[in-house]
Amino acid sequence: MARDIAVAAIVFTDEAGRVLCVRKHSSPRFQLPGGKPEPGEGPVATALRETREEVGIDVDAEDLSFLGRFTAAASNEPGCTVTSTVFLHPGPGLRPSLRPAPAAEIAEAAWIDPAAPDREIAPLLRERIFPALGAREITAVAVYAGARDGTNPANRALARAFGEALADAGITLVYGGSRLGLMGQVAEGASRSIGVITEHLQGYEIEYDGLERLEVVPTMAARKARMSELADAIVALPGGAGTLDELFDDWTSQQLGLHTKPIGLLGSEFWAPLVTMVDHMVAEGFLRPTDRAHMVVADDPAELLAKLRAWAPPVPRWL
């Protein structure tokens, strides 16, 4: 059985989308800055230390996002596999001063285009990490929204516009299945929709007639879990207690690393008090700054979808 080598690494990109790669003196292949953990060291600490030692770049852990864990054949140790926990450093606009300075065992640093590598690169980079760097594919979005229209007509128009944006993008709507309120408006705008409703609510005959499919589940907890399971991203529109319950359930799971799906809030004016409360929780030390930084808020449906495609998850809380 092949021995697996655990490493941790960080992806840095420049303004052209090229990725910072390094080559060791002992190898002809380029790989990401990073390496093996020291005793008692977690993946984040390993990636930070190795980056500092190999290319002289100091990184704040709060700035990192999480790309994932990837496994492939080891480049320099025949018969072994390597599993890398890979983090992302923020976008190029935030790091114009990055000047890698190869040190220690590193012979060379280079910026390599992941779409067309011009150097020999390690299997893990070529087969697993580079392909994961593109925009995420979103084919279905779970939408949480009020079952009432509310008092602000702009929210009703926003819900309808978001459904239309999903239709324009060929994205399936996954939602609570109701014809009422903002939920019904999103469904009216969408071209394809899947409803998930509880046995209790189905008894009130509130489901939307134009559903492509309606799934009936026993409980509200099962409803939330199924909607999240069917979707590639999650969006909350203005709503009440049920909308907040659904939103916070998915957001907590995201912070814990139970899923890596983007969550967006549509309608900044409505969500402003919540965002202020989130800032307060960060200031009081109950929420990590990175969780606040990874919140996606927008007013335009197309802008929100673009942000969700470009989003990367925060580092899981207990990683």
Image (cartoon, rainbow, N blue to C red):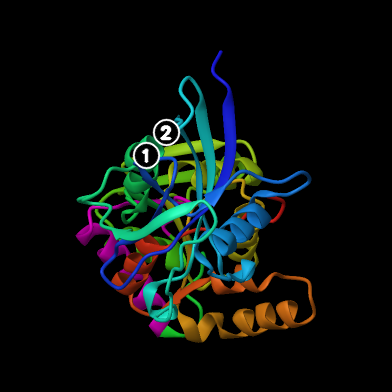
Instruction: Answer yes or no: is residue 84 visible.
Output: yes
Which quadrant holds the N terminus? Answer: top right
Q: Which residue is mark 1?
A: 122
**Location of residue 125 (image quadrant):** top left
Q: Amino acid type of disc 1?
A: Ala
Is 141 a magenta residue?
A: no
Question: Tag 1's secondary structure?
Answer: loop
Q: Is residue 45 left or right of residue 144?
A: right
Magenta-highlighted residues: 154-179
Q: Which residue is mark 2?
A: 75
Q: Measuring from the top left, give residue 48's x and y in whole percent.
A: 61, 61
Q: Is residue 245 left or right of residue 189?
A: right
Q: Nearer the viewer, residue 277 or 214?
A: 277
Q: Residues within 10 Å of mark 2 (few under 14, many from 20)?
A: many
Above or below, 103 against 67 in this view is below
Is tag 2's residue or tag 1's residue first in the polypeptide sequence? 2
Residue sitting at x 38%, y 74%: 92
Q: Amino acid type of disc 2?
A: Ser
